[in-house]
């Protein structure tokens, strides 16, 4: 299974304590192995993703200096799902607070 598929599998898990305590760290580790490569792939397909997957993804973003990550966060601000846009606003705030 490639890294993007592993990431998607983790992102599709319910947003519960186990996600927040364990799986989110595992998902971020996958991203960090190849931030620009994985997130570039996500940029090409995120608009077709379901709300839970996007919300979990947005929860992970905002901690890296990657320009691809920044671009993805700002695209997620335009999500049709308010929960995703909310998480993206939190991630954007993280970027802005470090600027």
Image: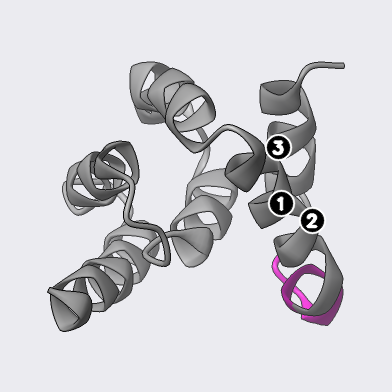
- Contact flag, marks 3 and 1 (Cβ < 8 Å): no
Label 1: how many Cα within 10 Å (few below 14, some 14–19, many 20+): few
Whether 70 is among the magenta residues is no
**Residue designated by label 1:** 29
Image position, residue 90 (x, y; %): 30, 76
* 66, 85: nearer the viewer: 66
Looking at the picture, tell me which residue is in the foreground, 68 or 85: 68
Which badge, 3 or 1, is on the more N-terminal residue? 3
Residue 18: say if magenta: yes
Q: Which of marks 3 and 2 is nearer the N terminus?
A: 3
For the C terminus, give its image quadrant. Answer: bottom left
Q: Where is residue 24 in the image (x, y as percent from the top left)?
A: 71, 63
Q: How far apart are marks 3 and 2 (CA)?
A: 9 Å
* Total numbered labels: 3
Q: In this view, does 8 lie above or below 88?
A: above
**In the rendered structure, which segment of residues is drawn in magenta?**
15-20
Q: Label 3 to label 1, Cα distance in Å?
A: 9 Å
In the image, residue 61 sits, relative to residue 34, either above or below, namely below
As helix, strand or loop, the secondary structure at mark 3 comes to helix
Q: Which residue is drawn at 71% across and 51% down?
A: 29
Whether the residues at callouts 1 and 2 have beta carbons within 8 Å, the answer is yes
Q: Position of residue 10 (x, y in %)?
A: 77, 46
Q: Residue at x 50, y 37 (%)?
A: 35
Q: In which quarter of the image is the N terminus?
A: top right
Q: Which residue is drawn at 42% across and 67% down?
A: 63
Q: Mark 3 near mark 2, Cβ–Cβ under 8 Å?
A: no
Cα separation between marks 1 and 2: 5 Å
Task: Say which residue label 3 marks.
Answer: 7
Q: Quadrant of residue 40?
A: top left
**Residue 75 falls left or right of residue 30:** left
Disc 1, SS: helix
Q: Mark 2 points at which residue?
A: 26
């Amino acid at each position: 299974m490639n890294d993007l598929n592993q990431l998607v599998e983790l992102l599709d898990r319910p947003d519960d304590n186990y996600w927040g305590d364990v799986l989110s760290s595992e998902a971020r580790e996958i991203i960090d192995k190849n931030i620009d490569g994985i997130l570039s792939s996500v940029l090409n397909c995120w608009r077709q993703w379901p709300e839970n997957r996007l919300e979990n993804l947005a929860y992970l973003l905002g901690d890296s200096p990657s320009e691809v990550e920044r671009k993805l966060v700002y695209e997620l601000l335009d999500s049709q799902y308010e929960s995703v846009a909310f998480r993206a606003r939190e991630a954007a705030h993280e970027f802005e607070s470090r600027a």
